[in-house]
Image (cartoon, rainbow, N blue to C red):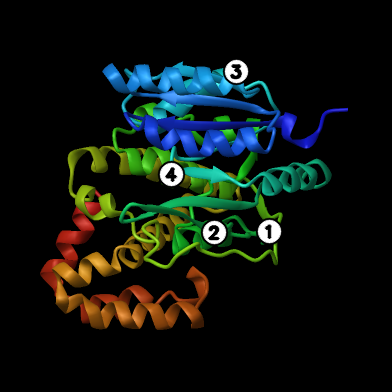
């Protein structure tokens, strides 16, 4: 009988960060991880050679690890799409080269998914490497739990929190579908994290396999993952616009499969994604456009009162009244071309 971790593949996309790989690989060695590890490597030159050396050393210490050459891929999303061809296990997840999938979370997630066929994914605890000066520590984060039967509610919950699901353990058939469109999207953020997470939550329920477990940070500091630093910068780029069109088409198709009409799905998508993007970017927007703060404050308060779209259909009107009309039009055009 296979032990739970033997049924797991961990995909680690990386690009010119060999030093960051050492810590997660050493962790998996220390836990005697028996599953498969695939390094989706976009590195070149000395970094590629250093990565090869680190992986070779990990092999000698017992890891089942392989490098997949992804040098010519656009970004991590398309690198994972190629790497999926080498997955030989029923369950898979991805972590960044500075993250760690906590071993107990992996085993509990496998055990849960083996028993609950209606769930597409389960999450444990992820450790994020945090640097403070010359010191390193781990910030532990738990996963988002989405157990409603309604596809639109699951999508709304993800879009509101932007807790990406790619580091949750997925069934392989769902995982491959999540990255099916990555090569069509030049923007890494949408192709690697946002659209895969949308497909994940629309495909079924997600469970926090270690619900109630405590987590901590070795030392204090801001969680850099709350607001992705590149999201605001890329929002008006051509790459983002192309990727956003692909994402919109795919998400609406999934909503229609869930029994929602095309018209309703389109309205839902436009409002939910626009509002969630504004929410995620709130800190950046307030820095750049101070006039947005009253609207964003109102939005934050309303989230607790109107948890889902159909209970907050007037929320867009609330925001448009408080935002400068010209600014609102510009932002909407840039996000939805």
Res. 37 mark: none
Res. 193 mark: 4
Disc 1: which residue: 149
Q: Residue at x 35, y 67 (%)?
A: 279
**Which percent across, then down, holds residue 252?**
46, 47
Left or right: where 306 falls relative to 324: right
Asked if residue 279 is positioned above or below residue 8 in the image, the reply reads below
**Which percent across, then down, holds residue 258?**
60, 49
Circle 4 Cα neighbour tier, 10 Å, few/some/many (<14 / 14–19 / ≥20) = many
Disc nearest the viewer among 3 and 4: 3
In what element is the residue under mark 2?
strand
Q: In the current view of this chain or complex, which residue is farthest to the front? A: 134
Disc nearest the viewer among 3 and 1: 3
Asked if residue 144 is positioned above or below residue 327 in the image, the reply reads above
Left or right: where 173 falls relative to 303: right
Left or right: where 90 falls relative to 222: right
Disc nearest the viewer among 2 and 3: 3
Q: CA distance from mark 2 to mark 3?
A: 31 Å
First-in-chain label (3 vs 1)? 3
Q: CA distance from mark 2 to mark 1?
A: 25 Å
Disc 3: which residue: 60
In what element is the residue under mark 3?
helix
Q: CA distance from mark 3 to mark 4?
A: 32 Å
Asked if residue 285 is positioned above or below residue 105 in the image, the reply reads below
Res. 141 mark: 2
First-in-chain label (4 vs 1)? 1
**Which percent across, then down, holds residue 150?**
63, 59
Q: CA distance from mark 3 to mark 1?
A: 46 Å
First-in-chain label (3 vs 4)? 3
Q: Residue at x 23, y 55 (%)?
A: 232
Residue 117, located in which quarter of the rendered image?
A: top right
């Amino acid at each position: 009988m296979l032990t739970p971790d033997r049924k797991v593949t961990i995909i680690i996309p990386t690009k010119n960060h060999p030093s960051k790989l050492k810590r997660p690989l050493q962790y998996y060695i220390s836990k005697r991880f028996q599953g498969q590890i695939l390094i989706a490597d976009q590195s070149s030159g000395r970094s590629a050679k250093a990565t090869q050396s680190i992986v070779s050393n990990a092999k000698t210490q017992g890891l089942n690890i392989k490098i997949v050459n992804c040098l010519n891929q656009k970004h991590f999303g398309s690198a994972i799409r190629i790497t999926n061809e080498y997955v030989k296990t029923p369950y898979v997840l991805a972590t960044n080269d500075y993250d760690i999938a906590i071993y107990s979370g992996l085993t509990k997630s496998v055990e849960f998914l083996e028993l609950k066929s209606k769930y597409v994914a389960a999450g444990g605890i992820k450790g994020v490497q945090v640097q403070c000066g010359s010191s390193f520590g781990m910030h532990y984060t738990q996963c988002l739990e989405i157990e409603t039967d309604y596809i639109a509610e699951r999508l709304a919950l993800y879009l509101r929190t932007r807790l990406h699901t790619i580091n949750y353990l997925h069934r392989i058939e769902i995982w491959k579908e999540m990255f099916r469109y990555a090569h069509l999207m030049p923007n890494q953020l949408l192709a690697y994290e946002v659209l895969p997470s949308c497909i994940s939550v629309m495909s079924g329920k997600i469970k926090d396999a270690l619900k109630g477990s405590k987590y901590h940070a070795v030392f204090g500091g801001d969680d850099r993952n709350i607001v992705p630093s590149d999201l605001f910068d890329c929002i008006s780029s051509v790459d983002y616009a192309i990727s956003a069109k692909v994402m919109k088409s795919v998400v609406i198709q999934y909503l229609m499969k869930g029994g929602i009409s095309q018209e309703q799905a389109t309205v839902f998508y436009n409002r939910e994604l626009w509002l969630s993007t504004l929410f995620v970017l709130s800190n950046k927007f307030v820095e750049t456009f101070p006039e947005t703060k009253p609207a964003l404050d109102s939005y934050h308060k309303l989230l607790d009162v109107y948890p889902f779209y159909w209970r907050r259909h007037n929320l867009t009107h609330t925001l448009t009244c408080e935002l400068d009309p010209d600014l609102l039009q510009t932002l909407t055009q840039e996000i939805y071309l």
